[in-house]
Image (cartoon, helix red, strand yellow):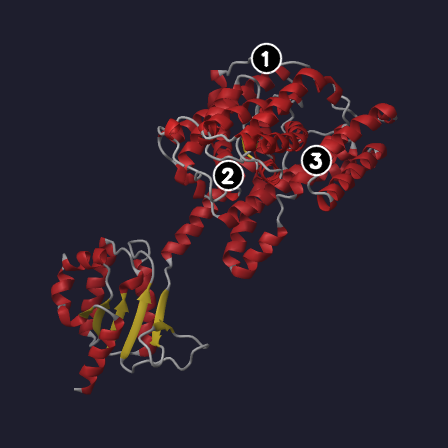
Amino acid sequence: MPDKANKFGLLPSWLSNYEKSWLRFDVIAGSVAAAVVIPKAMAYATIAGLPVQVGLYTVLIPMVIYALSGTSRALSVSTTTTIAVLTATELEDLNTIHNPNLLITALVTLTCLVGIILLLSAVMRLGFIANFISEPVLIGFKAGIGMVIILDQISKLLGIHFSKGSFIHNLSSIIQLLPESSIPTLALGVIMIILLMGLEHFFPKVPAPLIAVALGITIMKVLHLQSFGIEQVGYIPKGLPSIVWPDVSLVSQLWGGALGIALMSFTETIAAGRAFSKGDEPPIKANRELLATGLANTGSAIFGAMPSGGGTSQTAINRIAGSKTQVSALVTAGIALLTMLFIAPLLGSMPQATLAAVVIVYSIGLIKTRDFREILKIRRTEFIWALVALIGVVLFGTLKGIVVAIIVSLIALAQQVADPPLRVLGRKPGSNVFRPLSVEHPEDETYPGLLILRPEGRIFFLNASRVGEKINALLSKYKPRVIAIDFSGVFDLEYTALKMLIEAEKRLSNAGISVWLVGLNPTVLEMVNRSSLSETLGLSRMHFSLELAVKKFNEEKGN
């Protein structure tokens, strides 16, 4: 039903079309999602070296702002593992670890910059960037992120401390410090990992992170685990967050990282929103999502929230629990507010090992070995792209890893357009179907003296020479009298390519080989008609279909 109250798109459709019967589903879904999102957000805050309450702030404000401005009805917006580790990298580069005030100021500035970049992207209508990184590269990038996060959390499971650095440095430090590990801390962490994985596997609808956190706090208090050297989260202030203003002097240092975080935030948001959208719901609008996530980040920044975006796992939980609209997100945010106001100090008794276990279990999901196997099965080249992206993150760090991922995607795109397919066609017996010659169909008809080729894609300056090289190789192999080029699969012929075709026709004509053009679409035909090639070929060497071209060839051969 059309949303007349929202015809200008300023409000989410659910606000004016809300049905009372949906409320029960939204309240239940929002409550279930809160039980998962809140503990995870607190754990993700620790990835970035931030106080755990920052995770609460990141659940509260971005969730509300997105609910009022986004296009997805199911999307759950807070921080994610990818965003958290990118944030950690950027804050570590500023060396804020020993200066809590600078840490929060830098965080506020970073989150604000991420929001501004997303808003500017919305104004410039850059929603197409959602498809900027290819799926295999994104899979490799996320797997690398998962490995970095897990290695980072292992030190907390072991109860050891060292100055963090590159992946190789951290791995080497952990190996060197293994003898100093805290056995009680490790035992607790392993138990929590087993508990979380068991609940996720056997009882997927149960809020596993909430159970782990509640159990961790309980045994910490009852068994006085701190006396065994097990570290706890520490004091968490109760109440609303204080307002902190961005520091303009930090912009020059943070804008590069903010750009990378904004890209990943938007990519994850669009992916999650589209994945859990139902057919009867309004479509996900990429540019509106840029606006919504931009508002969510800028609006939450001054309250000390981390950069945020749509999370796939938490959105899945929200949808599975029965969410109908973004009211469920408002319920999740409301529970986060109640947590901040009344039970935040209790959460301070949580063991660090419990938070580390939560992060590790949900970061493992980023390393999708099945996806790697499927990519390898389908296309080895794209499997290599995924591995390069993974290695880029591990060796060069997460932010530089984004650059590696983008470069790999661009190289992959360039490789595809620079080497378009060129098929040698035969005719299926007893039909007018022409298809690529293959060992599966040795019975397909060919015509001595006639070579039928079908290039595919756009032919332009970047790939015209490569197409020419392939044609020359086939001419040497088949030695035809006539070459018929089927352009039905070519949607555009750029000037440079057309000029090369004109020159090639002259050379082949001098060598006694006649060039025929077949099946040109209106755009390509118009290009040819504007050139000298049209007069050179005339109607006798330009054909509407391959069937007519073959008929003409056979007639000439018969004469």
Which one is nearer the viewer's eye here, 25 or 398? 25
Residue that mark 1 sits on: 242
Tell me the distance, in whole angstroms, between the alpha carbons under discs 3 and 1.
30 Å
Precedes in sequence: disc 2 or disc 1: 1
**Is residue 399 shown left or right of residue 128?**
right
Q: Which amino acid type is marked by label 2?
A: Gly
Check the image and report above or below for 393 versus 429: above
**Is residue 363 shown left or right of residue 559?**
right
> What residue is at 25 percent from the left and 77 percent from the top?
550
Dividing the image into 4 quarters, which one contains the N terminus?
top left
Q: Quadrant of residue 318?
A: top right
Residue that mark 2 sits on: 273
Q: Which amino acid type is marked by label 1?
A: Ser
Is any part of residue 400 visible from this angle? Answer: yes
Is any part of residue 253 visible from this angle? Answer: no
Check the image and report above or below for 311 versus 464: above
Q: Position of residue 534 (x, y in %)?
A: 14, 63
Tell me the distance, in whole angstroms, between the alpha carbons under discs 2 and 3.
22 Å
Precedes in sequence: disc 2 or disc 3: 3
On residue 207, the disc is: 3
**Is residue 175 shown left or right of residue 184?**
left
- SS under mark 3: loop
Which one is nearer the viewer's eye here, 47 or 400? 47
> What residue is at 50 percent from the left and 24 percent from the top?
65
Which one is nearer the viewer's eye here, 482 or 66? 66
Which one is nearer the viewer's eye here, 221 or 249? 221
- SS under mark 1: loop
Tell me the distance, in whole angstroms, between the alpha carbons under discs 2 and 1.
31 Å
Q: Position of residue 35 (x, y in %)?
A: 68, 31
- SS under mark 2: helix
Residues under numbered marks 2 and 1 in contact, where contact means CB atoms less than 8 Å apart: no
